[in-house]
Amino acid sequence: AGRRWRSQSLCAWSPAAAVAAAAASVDAPDAPSAEMMARGHDAFVRASSLLVAAAMMALVAVALADGPTCIAPDSQSLTTATTTPLYEWTSMPFQFPDGRAPEPGEWDKSICVPSGVKVHDGTYYLTFPRWHAAGIPITLGRLSADGSKIEAYPSWDWQEVGNAAALQSIQDIEIDNRGRLWILDVGRAGILDPSPPAPPGAPKLVIWDPSREEVVATHVFSESVISYSHSFANDLVIDQPRGVIYISDAKGAGGVVSLHVASGRERRFEDPTFGVDGKDITVDGSALPLRTPVDGIALSPDTEYFYYCALDSTALYRVKTSVLRDWSATTVATLGTAAELVGDKGDATGGMIFSAAGKLYFGGMQCSAVYEWDASKPLAQTRVLLNNGAAQTTGVSRALASVAGNITDPLSWIDTFAFDGDDVVFTVNRLQQLLFPASAGAYNMAAGAPPNFRVYRIPVGSGTYLTAQRMPASGPTGSVGQGDLNAARTAAIVASAFAFVLAVALWAVVRKLKAATARLRTRSRGVSYQELAA
């Protein structure tokens, strides 16, 4: 309606029409008095100013109308089709440039494990953390529509190990409402190697625009915020309106990092609630010492709360994002009383994500399950969305495993969550077999072996939390990238041209009115307009 109003208003009132109407009134036989013309002139100028202001307000209103908010209905019931993996692989189908064969030592299939997944317009992107410095040729890839090929993304040049300007090890990415990839780089490869090589670079954020195939922004974190040698930049969530991201550092005692991209302001927080419980977690029959601090993170759709949990803990916490956006101090801070215990979610969790409808989706390590929690209700009302009926009950604080399995495929190590339209998407990767091969067993990559890696997609009737956010007019980073500068310049030129034409038209009208006023006054003195003009 706003667009229709704007179009009709601007078309009905054009500068040419205004000039013609003013000229017609000046040349009318029964002209008004000079006093009336003067008052009319002043009124017209005021009305014109109001009209210009109204037109500009309409343009601003239309510009801010982007970024719809999606409200979801209740989750749909599952069917056989929706509980079947969307993609599955025994090993990852990497495609090397020009069809060449991998060089010796370049590709070790047994350590190339998909972790992160994000989707935009039907295109799936997968991350492959470089747990080892050698043998993982691609750390960020783009999946073909049929899932048969994975190509390096953005290109093979971006995958070079040891090049600080390239991508070293990617655990997680996010895609904003404009389709831009926010790529979180750990900064170094070989985090599981006995003697990791010297870090080739620092942890960094790269914002990439696929539509323009260019970098929008890059931020290299300072070592005081994310250690260059003892950190694991794990997951990120985006607050688009404020141009802020929140990151989990899942190494050591753990930490949460806030970054305001436009200004480069960054803060680190450390808190006891980020730490591990120190208990073993049973995953697919193997008791594992998963000593990973703050791992799963999620941002509420209204951007007001940041939720988090450690990998080996069943506790779910949250903190107001206003606390994480306190840029007044530069030292590492604790959350103190700002950290809120939401409750016991009943299972150990890695990845999690909010929908636009305010429902939190997360995986369960012990119960091999996917859960759905409406954040407006108590955490105890968490619903089991999907499980395989082979849950481990050891250490589980609630009887979540009592729900009958609705899937036969093993859901062994549910990792990262995303959205594809109104469907929730997640990866299953048996990561325990990479991290603890002695106790969990190594991957079976032989031809004909069962799939090791899967991607599932389940309809839930709502999109990602990001669709509930209104994008800033200046761009997704809170500042204007090169592409945004081009668009801004174009908009400025159009606006300037419109203002110039409008000003010329108003000047012509005012000149006509002044001439008409002078003519009337001249007639009152008995001097003709022609004589005055001469």
Image: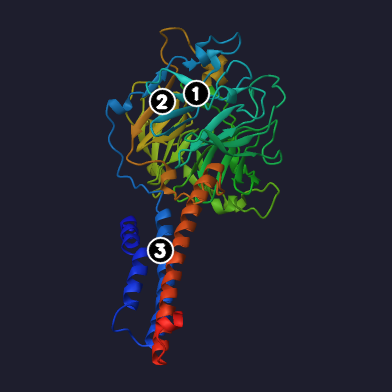
Q: Are marks 2 and 1 in contact (CB under 8 Å)?
A: yes
Label 3 sits on residue: 55
Q: Nearer the viewer, residue 164 or 17?
A: 17
In x, y percent, where is residue 331? 71, 48
At x 54% / y 38%, what residue is drawn? 236
Q: Nearer the viewer, residue 377 or 285?
A: 377
Locate residue 341 relative to residue 467 in the image: left or right.
right
> CA gap, disc 3 to disc 2?
49 Å
In x, y percent, where is residue 514? 44, 79
Q: Nearer the viewer, residue 496 or 2?
A: 496
> CA gap, disc 2 to disc 1?
9 Å
Tag of residue 455: 2
Label 1 sits on residue: 114
In x, y percent, where is residue 192? 63, 22
Locate residue 185 relative to residue 458 in the image: left or right.
right
Q: Earlier in the sequence, mark 3 or mark 2?
A: 3
At x 40% / y 46%, what residue is drawn? 358
Mark 2: which secondary structure? Answer: strand
At x 59% / y 13%, what residue is drawn? 106
Q: Earlier in the sequence, mark 1 or mark 3?
A: 3
Residue type at the position of mark 2 = Val
In x, y percent, where is residue 398? 42, 36
Mark 3: which secondary structure? Answer: helix
Could one spot residue 301 in this view of the protein? yes
Residue type at the position of mark 3 = Ala
Q: Is residue 412 above or below residue 241?
A: above
Q: Are marks 1 and 3 in contact (CB under 8 Å)?
A: no
Tag of residue 17: none
> CA gap, disc 1 to disc 3?
51 Å
Residue type at the position of mark 1 = Pro
